[in-house]
Amino acid sequence: MGTIVLQTRSRRIGAGALALAMMLGAGAAALPAQSPPAQSPPAGTSAVAALPAELAGFDLDFVVLYRADDPGMALRPAGIPNLVYNVASWRAFDPARADLATSKRDDSSQGDGFDDRILDGRAEKRSADYFNSGERIHLAPARIARQGSRLIAHYPADPRFTLTAEVDLAAKPYPLLRWHLTAKVPGNFSVGYVGAPQVAPAAADEVWQPLVWQEKRMPDRAYLTMAYRAPLPTAMVRRGGTAYAAIAHPSEFPFQPLPTADNSRFGVAVRTEDGQASPQIFAPVMGGAGSKLAAGASTGFSAYLVRSEARDLTQLYERLARTVYGFRDYRSNAVGSLNAAFDTITDYSMSAYARWIAELKGSSYSTDVPGAVKNVSSLNPLMLALVTDRRDIFDDRVVPYVEFMLSREKFLFSLDPEQKIQHPSRQLLGPAAPVSELAALYDIFDRRNPAYLALARGEFEGNRTRNLDVAESGRTWPNALSLYTATGDRALLAEAVAGADRYLQRRVVTPATRFEDGAFFFWPEFVPDFVDLYRLYEATGARRFLAAAQSGARRYAMFVWMAPAIPDATVTVNPGGKAPVYWYLKGKGHTPMSAPEEQVPAWRLSEIGLTAESSGTSTGHRAIFMANYAPWMLRIGADAQDGFLRDIAKAAIIGRYRNFPGYHINTARTTIYEAADYPLHDHKQLSVNSFHYNHIWPMATMLLDYLVSDAHVRSGGAIDFPAQFIEGYAYLQNGFYGHRAGRFHGDRDVWLWMPRGLVKTDASELNYVAGYRGDALYLAFANQSDTPVTARFTLAADRVQRVGRLRVMRLSPAGTAALDGEGYGVTVPAGGQVALRIDGLRADARFQRAMRAGGKTPVAHDEAGLGFGDARAYLLDFGALGRRGFVYLRDDDRSIGSATLRYRDASGTRQELTDTSFPFEFSVPLPAGAPFAFRLSGVKTDGSRDAGVETVLGR
């Protein structure tokens, strides 16, 4: 039989001939009446068959963009209301259609991750509409022939180029489109596939274009997302139960070098030239890599065409990530156990390298704001002190951290009144702590300090700006939930449920259409609040909140890198013994770092599982190590039986570092982040990535949360430690553990306890959690590899005391555990867990026990307002660890010259402290149960004196 050659017209000029012909089959009868008659085919080839059902609605239309001059590609702020985002732009080919306006740069948009070349660039006569980056030449096939499994399209002649295209219908996992352009004249070319089905935006149930257009947020113009900012290199549209995509073949998106704007060979878009929703893919990018061609030079590209059933686009996102880009459970503890990393980071947090500034009670924030300090949450060091059993963390970090969060107005504090970067505060108009933190402190310290609850209720009824310039409302359903978890007040739970149900209708059931309800910057703002929805599910057991949390988490997953695909190969890193230098730090005088040149498996270097920092810094912070979403995804994935979320969680955390790794993967692929000594340098000697020292505590918290969550999930919930909530700000949310006893399989009243070096094992693939009850130690080993692990382990002799006959009891159904004369042995199945109890051992948990030993009697009169300096005083009760008198002046050095505190110490001796510089504050250690009797006096800047009044708290 001969080949039938089809003459077609584009549906954009009215016929839609290819799609219709291919659906109905070959032959003249399949063609519309206006189509030219079929030509006689050459003999000896097969007939054209019907287009597969999975490509119904597709055709082979293209747009070629051309210009002879320099397109001047550059990123510029998009100028979209409520959204901080930079977009690719070009010198407008048609100046009358220039659409970028110069936007005023906000003080928040400064510091690490912000690129002055983008934000200060000129916008005159530029366009972010990709169809205005060059002359548009629309092409529909002049004829299409079938050869075996291939459809081959030929296009009308053009004096500037020749274009051919073909579709391999037998390719897997989807039909594969290839195109080829040969230039006849020199210039810049971009070829765009525009043949996917088009849907009117109002009729589309969902669109997706990385990074920021999700749900029904349709771009207001035809923006192009370049490859390096595409977690999955595709755009998608869904109508009803059918979704469409065009996704770059993995060979078009190489693993090396690290994707950047300069090496991005293609881009994707979801808005067509005439404003319809349709997946489009363009290669090369106009003015980008490979765009400029000499006469006779050529360029080509390949992409899969996808038509798939999907109830939402997160389904298709997962499917494409797994089948096209090979996403899977791919990481292991090759560089060391997560426990070892947790111990090392906790130690690092207390070292001089962590740049804690004691006199300002905060972590240095000089990377972004010179001279400033910034803290996240006092609950981070508090949990670590409690679980790792360290008094030094409590005394030197927790107490000043709590005092900072009570007194400062915002998380970012600077003494420089002229400092404007990221909107710091110089005022002591606290609390900076949000409702959730104040409520958690009240609960964690057994409700002994009513002041925490009073402050929480005050914040609940008000509004405050705590971070950057983002205003927060107090009376929200998540805050009502936090107050309920601290007080047990069922009316607050009812308010949280009612508010959440309204939220479900407004934000989950109803897709978002615009960027509204706040300033969109960090990824949690773009998706339903899966963290708080999951917390509410845990509090109520209502499955609707779990389903909503799963939906929000899966939408968050669409910010997680799934590309480029990881090759089964080794990669040479640190050539010449030098690590890469981050351009932002090079400009600040940071010196290059040495690192051994080595070859390592590509998977160890991959960003897959991580996200960019935010919409506003996604060009400068490609993949951040702060993956606080991971423990939440682990738990939501287990409860909702969602393997995609669980695999993402593991990919984000496991096998990435031995110590604090800095902030991001951002320059070139390197192993320097893995090194245990990587952060042990002075600030100016750290040049590979940026260091935000306020992140150290949240990262250690994140790792502990992951370890506890992983144990919970692998045990099917049989290992369960009660949690409080650490809100922090931005995306820095995690669970707080250790303040209440938990359950370890059938045993109750088990206390989470993980001091440094408690367990030593010869198998790095095993992570563990530990606890104690009475004279028994509890351990759960989790195997992070895909093969069984048999290991020996010992316990630190200075942390556990033998008090009787040792006996090992295996509590989990799988694996083995044994005791012999040389120590302990354990065999853990691939990807599994072994839980055990060792009787006859007593945990030396003196600090933890002391912290719990304070009783539940509330402190009488634990706060007061004072006249001099508009001061505030608190008596903070830390149980058997003692009390702390804390006094600070809300007035600053514009009106106060000095302040003096007179009090009696533990021995009854009179003491006097004078503070002559702002901030004016005093912290006085007191014995357990002791009252705080003091007098605050001082001198004002006008020379007048205030003798103060005698005040007693705690009596």
Image (cartoon, rainbow, N blue to C red):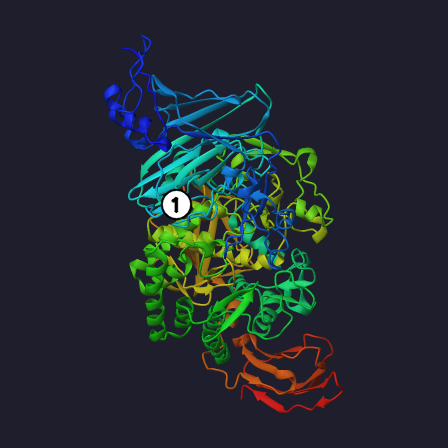
Q: Give coordinates of residue 652: x percent, y percent.
A: 49, 47
- Name the outermost residue toward the left: 29
Question: Please, what is the three-letter code of the amino acid marked with disc 1?
Answer: Val
Between 315 and 382, the residue placed more toward the observer is 315
Q: Give coordinates of residue 127: x percent, y percent.
A: 55, 43
In the displayed structure, 363 sits above or below 407; it is above
Between 557 and 953, the residue placed more toward the observer is 557
Q: Give coordinates of residue 860: x percent, y percent.
A: 50, 86
State the residue position of label 1.
207
Q: Please indicate whether residue 865 sits to the left or right of residue 7 in the image.
A: right
The residue under the point 61% across, 39% down is 670
Between 124 and 307, the residue placed more toward the observer is 124
- Name the outermost residue toward the right: 943
Between 471 and 645, the residue placed more toward the observer is 471
Q: Secondary structure at mark 1?
A: strand
Question: Is residue 369 visible to the viewer in this orientation of the structure?
Answer: yes
In the displayed structure, 330 sits above or below 468; it is above
The residue under the point 37% across, 58% down is 507
Q: Quadrant of the N terminus?
A: top left
